[in-house]
Structures are given as C-alpha cells and as structure tokens.
Image (cartoon, coloured by chain):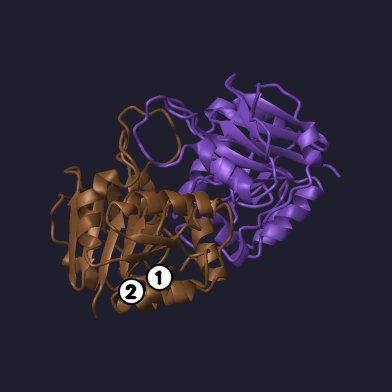
Chain colours: A purple, B brown
C-alpha cells in the first residue's frame, strides 16, 4: 500500500493567508501532483470555496477542479491528489454519502492518490466523525467516515482556559466522554499542527505546541512536533 | 393542552451549587410536584447523577427516582414531573431511543407532567438536537428529539471573544451554518437564563444578558430577560 496523507488541524493561521502556515508541508506532499480534486462540501458555496483553494494551490503548480464541477469519479481518476476542505463535518459527511464518494476516495488513496484534509477534511479521514467539534446541523446516514487512519483526531484542539467561568465542557472533558463510550485513541491536534502519513510512517508536524494524545484509562500525554507516531497506525479501535 | 416546561441553559453557575442559580424558577415550576423522575442518561454514572439531583431537589420537598431505577413508564405515571439532566446530548438521545422513552415523555408532558431540562435536557426538548454544542461521541438513530417547543435552542450560548486567535468557528457562525441548511429559529440562551412555558405562554428568565435569537436571512436580535416569547410557539420549522 502506497499512502500519502497530510492532515491539517486547521487551514488558516491568525494573520496568515489560507494554507500559508503549512506551505512547506504542502510543497512536500504535493511533489509530483499536477491535478487535484478539491472537495468543497463542508461549506455552502462550493464554487467560491473551490476558487479559494485553487488560488492557494496555484503557487504549487497544481491545477484544481471542484468535485462538484464534473463527474467526480472521472475527476478523481485524472488527478494525483484529493483535498477535502474544512467547514462543517456533518454537512461534509452527509454530502460524501449522498454523492457516494466515501469509498471511491478511500480506494484511490489506498492506491496512491495523495489525500490532504484540513479540519472537517481531517475528521472524515478518521474511522468516524465522533470527535469533531462541529454542530450537527444536518444528519448524515452514519458517523462512519473513511478511516484513512485507524484512530481519532480532534482538530483545533484547545487547552482548558484557566479561570474560565463558562460552564460548558472543556475540550478535554468532551474527549474523556468519548473515551467513556469508545476505546479508540484520540489525538487532540492544536492549531498549526499536522500529521503526515507515508505508508506505515506517521509524523506530527507544525508548531511546537504539538498535540495531546488521549487513551482510555490512561493519563493524556503531550506529543511534541516532530514526534514519530507510527505506532498509532497499529490501532485496533472499538466503537460503541 | 396543559404544558409546563422549565428549560435551563445550564445547571450550575460559577461559584454556586448545582441548580442554585435557578432556585426561584424551580420552586415555581415544582409547585404541586411531590414525585419526580430524573433522567440521568447524559452522563455515564446514572446512580451518582441521580443522587446529585435528588439532593438538590430535596429542598423543594420533591422525592426523586432515577429513570433507570425501575420501570420508567410506571415511574413516569406515578410522578408529577420529569427532569432531564445535562451532559452529552448524543448519549442522552441515543439512550432515550434505546429505552423507548422519547414518545412516553412527550405524551405525558402534553397531558400535564412538568418537564424540566438543563443543557442536554433542554436540547432534547427541541424538535432536533441539531443545535447542541456537544461532541457526537455515540450515534443516536435519529437527531429528532421530543419537540416540546417547535424551535431550536442553543444552550450555553457564548458571544464571540474579541481578539480570539482560535480559528474554529464562533458559536454565531455555527448557528448561521445551521440556518444555511434549516429554516428554523434558534434561540441562543446565555448561561444563567431559562425559558418557562405555561401552555401557550413562553417567557425568558434569568440573568440580564438574556438570549440572542437567530432566524434565516434576518439579523440576529437580542432578547432581554423577562421578554415574552410566546410568538415563537407558533413556529413552523423546516429541516433539511
């Protein structure tokens, strides 16, 4: 299996252009890619979102077509990469099911098509969307997603704010609730971080703050940027 | 139809005991109630959660039984009130479906059983859980909920934080995404607020900060504590 994935926690860093913070990782991931299919279904305006992605990726010499701008299967077959953009994860997954794109994307990525995801696009690369932060604005037929990695990711991971008077759960509390129900590791990826998978190798990249790894009945551990996380690819998860 | 509802945005205010901030509203709502069924399914430990509710409600002269501590239908029939506690909305709704309690609760509330909800318990009083803030840690068979009010509520409503560098969506952005997909008003209830329904009368109570009402294609409007919201009970929503 030849797999190349780039899973971004977020697409835009404060004060920077769309995708600018991840320029180096994108350049390496897109090496050899001339055509890319952009999946804009996490936002409402597919044309505008695709145009934004096309503009950002032109700098890498990549030609971008939206998955809604033709027969998506033919587009995938003519492309060397697929990029699933962020937005609302429920809307994205619902549309991937409605357009029957989940399995075709998974199959092509397993056969070497590069996969890039950011935020919601990273959520749907997990076995399930059960660790998204998004509001369930529409109902997908299932929470099962493409499983390009065998563990769960929580993008935009936020540390608890000292002295916060808000009584809603912290992100850590939410993830611990997930672990009460499911026995699957969750990587809380802080903003500005990404994961790169090359076959059986998995590495955390991006800002120093890194990520926080949660496992059932274990103390969460801090993961530094640059860490080798390949062992996570051996995960055998158990969802309730 | 004789309906009495108390829908709390949150169960605990900073520095106060469980339910303490809503003592007056609870006392009025629980007038005439001797027995209450507590629905603890939004948290993992049903016994502990029920004990906590029983302790808080003892001050109102109310005897509390957990919905898991006997035949729930018989318990409902012997009680004058049902209180659905907060926690994770997806876990709560999944359990209400699994135990076939959604319709029995709705029927009894329509015939005069008092309904109290807080946070997740307020979410499931709406037509759907599509405006919860919670993580989708388990998959309920449907997002449809009990519809004790015909519009949507977002509990723990949070205003955008000025200068926040976090790139995840603000609460308002999430609700506007909901309105892109669904044509149903959403009441963003700030912490410390509650709604009281008495038949066809609906009033916002609690802290002065009040609530923010979102409708498709309209500017959001601020709702002050004490406002009469009865017109919202005429809502005919349209979910995608």
Looking at the rendering, which quadrant does residue B230 occupy? Answer: bottom left
Looking at the rendered structure, the number of numbered marks drawn on it comes to 2
For image coordinates 36% across by 61% down, the residue present is: B63
The N terminus of chain B: image quadrant: bottom left
For image coordinates 22% across by 52% down, the residue present is: B219
Q: Nearer the viewer, residue B145 or A35?
A: B145
Question: Where does residue B39 sit, x and y in percent of width and height?
Answer: 45, 61
Drawn side of residue A134 relative to residue A185, left or right: left
Answer yes or no: do the residues labelled 2 and 1 have beta carbons within 8 Å?
Answer: yes
The vertical placement of A173 against B54, above or below, is above
The vertical placement of A190 against A181, above or below, is above
Disc 2 element:
helix
- Can you identify the residue that label 2 sits on? B109
Q: Is residue A99 visible?
A: yes
Question: Where does residue B16 sit, x and y in percent of width and height?
Answer: 30, 37
Which chain contains the residue that carries disc 1? B
For discs 2 and 1, the disc positioned in front in the rendered view: 2
Q: Nearer the viewer, residue B146 or B4?
A: B4
Farthest residue toward the right?
A: A1
Report the disc number at residue B146: 1
Looking at the rendering, which quadrant does residue A218 occupy? Answer: top right
Which chain contains the residue that carries disc 2? B
Mark 2 surroundings within 10 Å by alpha-carbon count, few (fewer than 14), some (14 through 19), many (20 or more): many
Disc with the residue nearer the chain's start (2 vs 1):
2
Question: Where does residue A44 sit, x and y in percent of width and height?
Answer: 44, 55
Looking at the rendering, which quadrant does residue A203 occupy? Answer: top right
Mark 1 surroundings within 10 Å by alpha-carbon count, few (fewer than 14), some (14 through 19), many (20 or more): many
For image coordinates 36% across by 64% down, the residue present is: B36
Q: Nearer the viewer, residue A98 or B162?
A: B162
For image coordinates 32% across by 46% down, the residue present is: B157
Question: Where does residue B51 sit, x and y in percent of width and height?
Answer: 45, 51
């Amino acid at each position: 299996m030849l797999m190349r994935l780039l899973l971004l926690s977020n697409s835009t860093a404060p004060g920077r252009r769309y995708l600018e913070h991840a320029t180096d990782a994108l350049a390496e991931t897109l090496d050899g890619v001339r055509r890319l299919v952009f999946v804009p279904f996490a936002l409402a305006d597919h044309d505008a979102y695709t145009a934004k992605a096309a503009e950002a990726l032109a700098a890498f010499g990549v030609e971008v077509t939206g998955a809604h701008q033709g027969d998506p299967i033919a587009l995938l077959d003519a492309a060397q990469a697929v990029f699933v953009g962020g937005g609302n994860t429920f809307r994205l997954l619902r549309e991937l099911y409605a357009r029957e794109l989940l399995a075709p994307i998974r199959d092509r990525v397993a056969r070497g098509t590069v996969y890039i995801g950011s935020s919601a696009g990273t959520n749907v690369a997990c076995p399930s969307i059960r660790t998204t932060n998004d509001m369930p604005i529409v109902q997908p037929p299932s929470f099962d997603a493409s499983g390009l990695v065998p563990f769960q990711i929580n993008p935009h991971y936020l540390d608890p704010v000292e002295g916060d008077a808000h009584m809603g759960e912290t992100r850590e509390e939410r993830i611990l609730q997930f672990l009460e129900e499911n026995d699957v590791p969750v990587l809380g990826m802080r903003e500005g971080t990404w994961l790169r998978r090359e076959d059986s190798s998995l590495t955390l990249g991006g800002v120093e703050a890194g990520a926080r790894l949660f496992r059932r009945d274990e103390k969460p551990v801090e993961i530094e940027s640059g860490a080798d996380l390949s062992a996570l690819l051996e995960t055998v998860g158990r969802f309730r």
